[in-house]
Amino acid sequence: MFAAVYAARGSSFETLLGVARDFSPRIETCGPYEVVLDLAGLTRLFGDAKTIADELRRTAADRGLRIRIAIAATRTAARLLARDRAGITIVEPGDEARALDNLRLELLEIFTAPPEPPEPPDPGSRIPDPVTVTLRRWGLRTLGDLAALPAAELAARLGQTGVGWQRLARGEDPAPLVPSVPEERFEQALDLEWPIEGLEPLSFVLARLMEPLSAHLERRDRGAAVLHVRLHLVKRDGVTREVHERSLQLPAPMRDARTLRTLALLDLESHPPSAAIDRVVVAVDPTPGRVVQFSLLTRPLPSPEQVSTLMARLTALMGEGRCGSAITVDSWEPGAFEMKPFLGSIANSGRIPNPESRTPRLAIRRFRFPIPARVRVDLGIPVRVTSDRRGISGGKVETYAGPWRTSGGWWVEDTKTYWERDEWDVTLSDGATYRIFRERDTDAWFVEGVVD
Amino acid sequence: MANQALARLENALRDRKLDRTLTTALPASQPRDDAAAIATDMAALDACLRGGLPRGQLSEIVGSASSGRTTLVLQTIAASTRRGEIAALVDTFDRLDVASAAAAGIDLQRLLWVRGPSISIGGAAGGPDAAIHRALKAVNLVLQAGGFSCVVLDLADVPPVTLRRIPFTTWLRVQRVIEGSETACVLIAPHPLARSAGGLTLSLAGRVWWTGEADRSRHLTGADIGIRIVSPRRRVDGEVSVPAFATTTA
């Protein structure tokens, strides 16, 4: 026996699901307001079908839900009846066809239409199913009319679709019930008898938590998209408690326990907890696992796990934002760029290489902070450049080109983004070619970079 | 007598696992072995290098400022990313100009850029020693991770005094890490440092071109990069000149 439960529009699906799960572990969700319960074996727990229906309705009412319930031997019959009749409907086994006999033909569209939207559709805007239109044109009005048609004739005219609709009209199930599996939580926690301090003992705790978590992910063919580490801290006074929480966005789904532990530890090295830890919780946001097809023809690239570990180690060494991939930005500001995470093998730029890019281009070595310089100017032309900074010997200007005036950022109130300057390329007597510029508002000279 | 002394010396080096400094320990280089080298995509240079910079070896690009070291390195990285490989640049003093890298044709998504402190020459917090120490650590991490076709360590702006303080064993260690791997490690420096037996040393000298006689119309057009290959052990000595063009003068 199956019970179809159809809740009023606007009801909470979570609540409906909660009510259904309280009665049966085998439930199938059929839309935002409808679930079907497998009642097999429940009679011994609750009583007959009527008692189960009453109990269901009472439980739902307690949780603020208004529901319709139909119990029948097939899911199809139960669903059709729940849609058509308010309250509780119970059909004895074998009586489905008669119970469905007078139901409107359009009800069958619940099996073909997409799940109902939260807002009720405008009745005028509803587009009827083409099969319903055809059946209506034939003069059929009820499910009984369709059920009574000869199956062979129906198949000749509408094919398997027609036969399928007729089976539904007779209350037959097209497929067995597919139970909805409750959403799993991928989380592991460990309460410690004695608070621990430092990352070394924590690494053992993390290893113990990560291994079952990784096995769980593997069983479900899932990978971690985000790794959450929650450390419950206890202050020295033994009373004050706080939670130190870190979340790591992983560049690709991964479930290798060692990699996850290393990433968590490297992140905690940069953001250490402020007190001793007495409870460790590790959770992941699951995502479908990665399907990787290796190639015999291309060189192997590091896996996302290796890249993530490398990036975490490099970030711990060099600092936040000092490692990654550079991206050019749409700006005339000299030296403008942005950083983004390096993705390695999963990077797919979709770039079409420019054939001209094979021609060697002169590069500049840019001083991120331009170096102040002393420039002697004769008739508006730099003739000698010197700097106190080691590495720039300076000297007489042998050849020059310029000036090129650039300005920008004047439309932004922040003065840091404003620039207005005259740029020169100069070859000095030391043999090096530099790009220098004069700030027009301060008349100060700087070395921006070396042509190399 | 001299041969016996030489044999004794070689045996002693082998005992201490320092035989990578011996020419006799090196496998003979195959002419135009593309799988054993990363091409720079500069035909004249690749022909001279018999395919490119050797994989699994530490090579050096040395020269003074404006000799074309950065241009050559960016071209090599660009060639590598064009082949779908990934590369890394450990930029000791954060000198990479992203626009130059993009103009060289580098697929920036395939370049791991490790930026050292953005300090001016000689003005490092903690001194350049700290920056170099971290850069060397970063290179080791990248090499140990594996999978990169080209890993570049940029020491071009490090003061000579500081460079001299780097122990020679540092380069032996780097050589050990990449031995047998598919990675070509490249060092940019003002003068040869590693002198790896298996790697190449490209000594550069650049000469820029200017166009326009009149003061106001003159501009930087490009440069001739003279490359001298110094590697007695692999016997690929040669000289080649490669033109490079300024970005604005397509």
Image: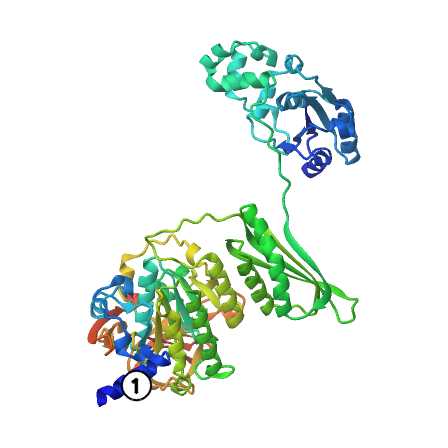
Is the residue A374 above or below the residue B107 in the image?
below
Image quadrant holding the C terminus of chain A, namely bottom left
Residue at image coords 55%, 16%: A166
State the residue in front, B27 or A29. B27
State the residue in front, A123 or A40. A40
Taking A292 as reference, is B69 left or right?
left
Q: Residue furthest bottom?
A: B1
Look at label 1 and name its amino acid.
Answer: Leu
x and y percent of residue A218 in the render? 55, 49
The quadrant holding residue A326 is bottom left
Taking A154 as reference, is A449 left or right?
left
Q: Is residue A442 visible?
A: no
| Parent chain of label 1 | B
Taking B12 as reference, is A277 left or right?
right
Residue at image coords 51%, 17%: A163
Image quadrant holding the N terminus of chain A, namely top right
Residue at image coords 59%, 22%: A173
